[in-house]
Image (spheres, rainbow, N blue to C red):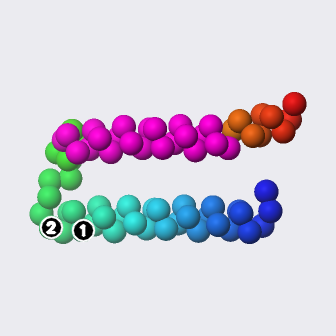
Amino acid sequence: MNRRNKTLIICGIIWAVLGLLITVLGFILSGGDFVAWFSSKPAMFLYIFLVIYFLVILVWFVIPAIKERL
């Protein structure tokens, strides 16, 4: 992995964390019940989406790495 790709991945992670923090902060400031949201229907859809997304990303990076080592 070259330096440009590492920089891109690190910047992407930083932006994702910042976006998540800003979203949570806005939710709390708007008066939402943060704890109750974790068991709501939209939260369940988000959990499913995130699991599928991380599985796809894992397969995207792990399979080429395995093929490269064979």
Q: Which mark is residue 53?
A: none
The percent coordinates of residue 28 (x first, y second) are: 20, 63
Q: Does the magenta stretch include residue 59?
A: yes
**Label 1 residue SS:** helix
The percent coordinates of residue 17 (x first, y second) are: 45, 62
Horizontal arrangement in the rendering, residue 69 relative to residue 53 (left or right): right
Q: Which residue lies furthest to the left in this view?
A: 31
Q: Quadrant of residue 29?
A: bottom left
- Please report the residue visible at 12 percent of the width from the left and 63 percent of the height from the top: 31
**Label 2 residue SS:** loop
The percent coordinates of residue 26 (x first, y second) are: 24, 68
Q: Which mark is residue 26?
A: 1
Inspect the image, locate mark 1, and give the three-letter code of the amino acid beneath it.
Gly
The percent coordinates of residue 46 (x first, y second) are: 32, 45
- The span shown in magenta is 40-61
Residue occupied by mark 2: 30
